[in-house]
């Protein structure tokens, strides 16, 4: 795996890329996360010589900030469309996104002309969401730190963010490798960065209320959900299963909102098997 910077749709960003065989697997992270959330999964894919790339979405990780003059989802879908065209100019890419990235994956599956082989949304936002953003903003210690006129040491801020992240994202946070948490909070560099990320979430919430036209999806969809997800409820999958002919659901037991971290081996197996399933169904 190699890490490099590039520009997509006018946004500077970072890619974690694996060279290998097979159709390109494009990996999109969730809200407030980064490409680092896929490192464990990329390790599994690399052992199988699979071609894959994880990207920092605009507004998150080390990518350029979102612009104020356009809707958030419009910017993210333009960015992801540019990624598909870069890594799969002749079609055939498979998109896998977690949470917000899963929402973007479904939105791209609606677009004509991209010729996606399939999408694998992991607990996609925009279907049936808990009031997780309100939970974050009500966190008393975090709210107090952001409102305080005094300087806030980065280590203190990151410790609070880490506790909120672990509580919401995982069913068994005690089993998650410390490196995962450190990678997540490393992008919360200071109070201004944290406020900007939360501001992007606040802007985006109205856009996530009903973003899909699922009847326009023509490619196969493999939905993946942890059965203990408290951020995006599994029952939202019913809308996709009822509307998209080539859609199915894979439920991962004993797992929370981020199966790519908590059940990386299982998600890797699903991604590796997906092209063969697509070929057999063709």
Image (cartoon, rainbow, N blue to C red):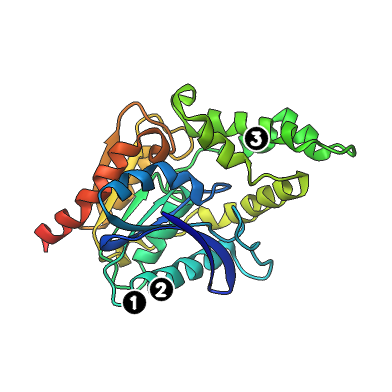
SS at mark 1? Answer: loop
151 horizontally vs 7: left or right = right
Q: Residues within 10 Å of mark 1 (few under 14, many from 20)?
A: few
Instruction: Give me the disc on residue 86.
Output: 2
Q: Give the mark toward the camera: 1 or 3.
A: 1
Height in image: 240 above or below 7? above
Residue appearing at x 53%, y 67% in the figure: 74
Residue 121: image location, x then y, percent: 36, 51
What residue occupies the far right of the structure in this picture?
149
Residue 179: image location, x then y, percent: 52, 35
Height in image: 90 above or below 133? below
Residue appearing at x 35%, y 38% in the figure: 264
- Report the residue marked by disc 1: 89
Q: Give the mark toward the camera: 3 or 2.
A: 2
Measure the alpha-carbon separation of dots 1 and 2. Answer: 6 Å
Instruction: Give me the disc on residue 161.
Output: 3
Please name whichever residue, 200 or 10, is drawn nearer the observer in this view of the structure: 10
């Amino acid at each position: 795996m190699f890490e490099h910077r590039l520009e997509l749709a006018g946004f500077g960003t970072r890619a974690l890329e694996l060279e290998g065989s097979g159709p390109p697997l494009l990996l999109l992270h969730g809200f407030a996360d980064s490409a680092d959330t896929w490192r464990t999964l990329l390790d599994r894919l690399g052992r199988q010589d699979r071609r894959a790339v994880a990207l920092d979405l605009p507004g998150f990780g080390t990518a350029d900030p979102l612009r104020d003059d356009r809707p958030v989802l419009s910017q993210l879908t333009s960015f992801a469309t540019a990624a598909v065209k870069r890594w799969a100019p002749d079609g055939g890419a498979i998109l896998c996104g977690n949470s917000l990235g899963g929402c973007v994956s479904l939105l791209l599956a609606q677009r004509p002309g991209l010729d996606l082989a399939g999408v694998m949304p992991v607990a996609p936002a925009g279907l049936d969401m808990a009031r997780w953003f309100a939970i974050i903003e009500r966190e008393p210690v975090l709210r107090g730190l952001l409102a305080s006129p005094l300087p806030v040491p980065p280590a203190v801020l990151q410790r609070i963010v880490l506790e909120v992240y672990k509580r919401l994202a995982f069913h068994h946070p005690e089993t998650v490798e410390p490196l995962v948490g450190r990678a997540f909070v490393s992008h919360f560099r200071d109070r201004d960065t944290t406020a900007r990320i939360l501001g992007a979430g606040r802007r985006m919430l109205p856009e996530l209320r009903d973003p899909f036209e699922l009847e326009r999806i023509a490619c196969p969809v493999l939905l993946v959900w942890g059965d203990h997800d408290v951020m995006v409820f599994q029952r939202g999958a019913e809308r996709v299963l009822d509307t998209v002919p080539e859609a199915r659901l894979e439920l991962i037991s004993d797992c929370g909102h981020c199966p790519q971290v908590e059940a990386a081996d299982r998600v890797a197996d699903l991604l590796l098997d997906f092209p063969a399933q697509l070929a057999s169904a063709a």
